[in-house]
Image (spheres, rainbow, N blue to C red):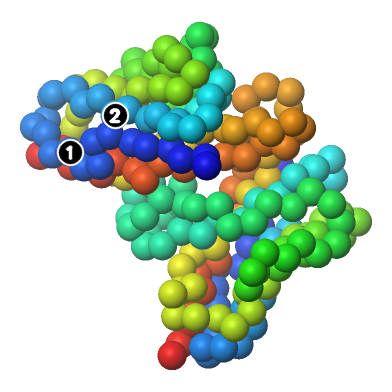
Amino acid sequence: GAVVSQHPSWVICKSGTSVKIECRSLDFQATTMFWYRQFPKQSLMLMATSNEGSKATYEQGVEKDKFLINHASLTLSTLTVTSAHPEDSSFYICSARRLAGPIETQYFGPGTRLLVL
Amino acid sequence: QKEVEQNSGPLSVPEGAIASLNCTYSDRGSQSFFWYRQYSGKSPELIMSIYSNGDKEDGRFTAQLNKASQYVSLLIRDSQPSDSATYLCAVPENAVNNRKLIWGLGTSLAVNP
């Protein structure tokens, strides 16, 4: 159990276009999902916390108008990179928080590689 | 500012040896602790979680928690080359909502055949 999927696994796009990434919890409901970004050889960086039915909470320095997050259901969160530029090229990873009684655990999707030309 | 600290390594061990990875945390109120493994180019995967003081074993992995000293460690017995990865320690932020994880920078482990 506790499977999280992401789609697409990789995407190449032209500068100025928008890219949508989907994150799904396949076998559990997730009221909270998280979006991370990771540049090569660097640490995970939390971008935002996505809550089902409410606005996402963005980390300091992350532009909410550029990285649009929608958590429309208990199993799906989407991240849209609007007007992508080469500096947005990165590895985007989502995680979903699973609650089992008082115990909560984050499970990660496989990630999406974005290359903006 | 809550912190989670790990030695960056690289930690190099021969195949078959025990690898010991350590993590310290600043928030005395922390209740749960996680170890993730991240292979190069891949996303993190959960290895172990621990909530109570003492040891928790799962196959070749043992997590050790000492809340009084504010450290949590991960032991990997009979290390294999396939264990070569970055190991990340994480502690949930102690808040009611939006319990994001506070991450260590990770320890790079190399298991040499």
Give the left or right position of residue A50, taking residue A63 as reference: right
Q: Chain under label 1? A: A
State whether discs 2 and 1 lie on one chain.
Answer: yes
Among the 4 quarters of the image, the one containing residue B60: bottom right
**Residue in front for this viewpoint, A47 or B97:** B97
Of callouts 2 and 1, which one flags the residue occurring earlier in the amino acid sequence?
1
Q: Residue at x 46, y 40 (%)?
A: A3
Q: Residue at x 52, y 9 (%)?
A: A54
Q: Are marks 2 and 1 in contact (CB under 8 Å)?
A: yes
Q: Is residue B1 visible?
A: no
- Judging by the rendered image, the residue that carries numbered circle 2 is A21
**Figure check: B36 above or below A36:** below
Q: Is residue B102 visible?
A: yes
Among the 4 quarters of the image, the one containing residue B31: top right
**Residue in front for this viewpoint, A16 or B46:** B46
Quarter of the image for the C terminus of chain B: give it. Answer: bottom left
* Residue at mark 2 to residue at mark 1: CA–CA distance: 9 Å
Q: Chain under label 2? A: A
| Amino acid type of the residue that numbered disc 2 sits on in the rendered structure | Ile
Q: 10 Å neighbourhood of mark 2: few (<14), some, or many (≥20)?
A: many
| Amino acid type of the residue that numbered disc 1 sits on in the rendered structure | Val
Kindly identify which numbered label has been placed on residue B48: none
- Residue A106 horizontal/vertical position (percent): 57, 39
- Residue B77 horizontal/vertical position (percent): 64, 79
- Judging by the rendered image, the residue that carries numbered circle 1 is A11
Q: Residue at x 44, y 75 (%)?
A: B82
